[in-house]
Amino acid sequence: MKEYYTIDVAGLKRDLPLCPLNDDLYIGAFVIFGDVELTVASAKALLEKAPPFDIMITAESKGIPLAHEMARQSGAADYLLARKAPKLYMKNVIKTEVQSITTAGVQTLYLDQKDMDKMRGKRVLIVDDVILTGESLHALEALVKEAGGEIAGKMAILAEGDAAERDDILYVQKLPLFDANGEPI
């Protein structure tokens, strides 16, 4: 069985370890944490495709370096972060649940009044590292709508499996799913 899949993202090659979701289905593990070169190049590639927006939002935690770099490159003053747990400083919190295929159990994402005020009536760009099932995007969409924001677009570095066929997301590169032998399916 193949252990890695080599992908070209924004002109950079990376070897992704293949990880099992079950006995028959594997994914390529894409992690931008610590890879500054990949984060910078991916942010640039996404901004070239981005629709007009006023502010960005991402979910904790893998989208943080991407949203930060996109904000830096675009000259944005800030970006929003849907937290995995409410913090003491958060007031008037709203929440939504998400079941991600790569995380065990149901997760909850939270926003506070300060962040809701920043997006109310604004064009909000939803940003993530990888989209597979779209559950995290769905959760972020629910938070944006509840807060009174307008969804400007949904973006990710990679669209994995069937997500690459969706017409409601923008992405840099496709990433296939893999069979038990490590072959793309």
Image (cartoon, rainbow, N blue to C red):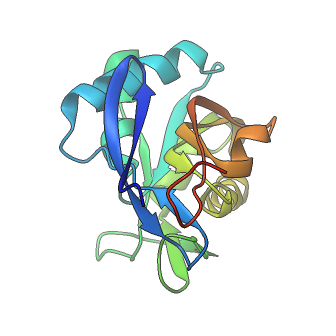
Q: In this picture, is 47 found above or below 108?
A: above
Quadrant of the rendered structure where residue 147 is? bottom right
What residue is at 33 percent from the left and 27 percent from the top?
Answer: 13
Q: Nearer the viewer, residue 34 or 1?
A: 1
Mark yes or no: residue 1 visible. Answer: yes
What residue is at 61 percent from the left and 76 percent from the top?
Answer: 99
Q: In the displayed image of the protein, which residue is found farthest to the top?
A: 48
Residue 159: x and y, percent?
61, 42
Question: Along the horizontal axis of the image, is 56 left or right of 145?
Answer: left
In the picture, the quarter occupied by the N terminus is bottom left
What residue is at 52 percent from the left and 61 percent from the top?
Answer: 181
Quadrant of the rendered structure where residue 174 is? top right
Q: In the displayed image of the protein, which residue is found farthest to the bottom?
A: 105
Q: In this picture, is 100 found above or below 16?
A: below
Q: In this picture, is 139 found above or below 151?
A: below
Q: Nearer the viewer, residue 123 or 109?
A: 109
Quadrant of the rendered structure where residue 79 is? top left
Residue 98: x and y, percent?
61, 73
Question: Along the horizontal axis of the image, is 65 left or right of 98?
Answer: left
Q: Nearer the viewer, residue 28 or 102?
A: 28
Q: In this picture, is 89 found above or below 29?
A: below
Give the number of callouts: 0
Mark yes or no: residue 93 visible. Answer: no
Residue 139: x and y, percent?
64, 63
What residue is at 70 percent from the left and 37 percent from the top?
Answer: 169
Residue 178: x and y, percent?
57, 56
